[in-house]
Image (cartoon, rainbow, N blue to C red):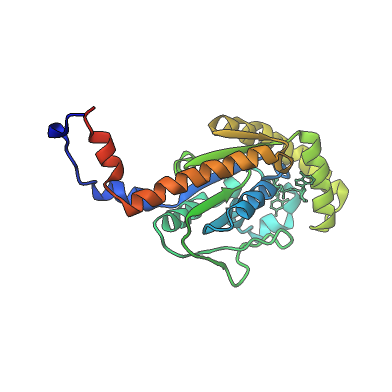
Amino acid sequence: TDLSTLEVEQPTTSTTENLKQPFVIGVAGGAASGKTTVCDMIIEQLRDQRVVLVNQDSFYHNLTSEELKKVYEYNFDHPDAFDTEQLLRIMEKLKHGHAVDIPKYDFKSYKNDIFPARRVNPSDVIILEGILIFHDPRVRDLMNMKIFVDTDADVRLARRIRRDTAEKGRDIGVVLDQYSKFVKPAFDDFILPTKKYADIIIPRGGDNHVAVDLIVQHIRTKLGQHDLCKIYPNLYVIQSTFQI
Ligand code: ADP
Ligand code: C5P
């Protein structure tokens, strides 16, 4: 090592600011694939960290009275069903350490203005979950890690029938019609093509404990590097300019 050539640079402000930003994880996959279950498992293992879950469902557009009258003709699985501009505004604020109010969405009334909105404080990890969370490149660019939950279509349909009839009080005929008219085509046209953006694909969703453990390990490694850089902001710059 030639110490005479050692240069210690001061990191630029933008570099240190970037290091302080939360670690953002995107979790995409078909409806009822087990996205929420996987997120809950990750959050459970990261109990000692400040983690917040943001659902794309919170950003469904409110329907007009005309759309409400013909709600069974509305495509909730199309990218245009979401207010992505609002999602981006809220994510930018959270990423920069500001508290935000996230709308609550009610699947029965189709409204996203349920009072009070959910107050979310800044955190170390933000998990963004939703069927089309990888569709818009600007949303993808917010993410440090992208996960796609890959569950067979028959399993997703079976779970959806159970969930929509039991929890949302919907008629099974309506659920099946919505599936063949909108849910399945939108999965093929918009959701499945975003699988290529994933860093990790999890087969069998929440049944895959090995995948969840590996993901949590990776997040912990990244958060550890993050903390070290907060304590010693020059550390990695010294390493990178060492002449060996
Ligand atoms: P998503 O968030 O992708 O819509 P969820 O995690 O909410 O999926 O799961 C959809 C439904 O399937 C829920 O009712 C959930 O309880 C059930 N479910 C999810 N994962 C499993 C699993 N591994 N085994 C059995 N049921 C599951
Ligand atoms: O939680 P999950 O990812 O399953 O939510 C997405 C699904 O919710 C979509 O497939 C969409 O069809 C459905 N949905 C619905 N009714 C609404 C809003 C969304 O059935 N009002």
Residue 232 visible in the current orientation: yes
- Residue occupying the point 62% across, 63% down: 104
- Residue occupying the point 28% across, 37% down: 239
Relative to 85, say whether 158 is above or below. Answer: above
Residue 202 locus on image (x, y percent): 65, 35
- Residue occupying the point 84% across, 53% down: 165
Single out the residue that lies furthest toward the bottom: 116
Q: Is residue 17 left or right of residue 129?
A: left
Image quadrant where one finds the C terminus: top left
Residue 26 locus on image (x, y percent): 55, 44
- Residue 51, quarter of the rendered image: bottom right
User: Could you say which is closer to the camera, residue 20 or residue 133?
Assistant: 20
- Residue 111, quarter of the rendered image: bottom right
Residue 132 visible in the current orientation: no
Q: Is residue 84 left or right of residue 153?
A: left
Q: How many marks?
A: 0
Q: Is residue 126 left or right of residue 230?
A: right
User: Could you say which is closer to the camera, residue 7 or residue 11?
Assistant: 7
User: Could you say which is closer to the camera, residue 217 or residue 84?
Assistant: 217
Image quadrant where one finds the N terminus: top left
Residue 108 locus on image (x, y percent): 74, 61
Single out the residue that lies furthest toward the top: 244
Relative to 2, say whether 159 is above or below. Answer: below
Residue 218 locus on image (x, y percent): 52, 41
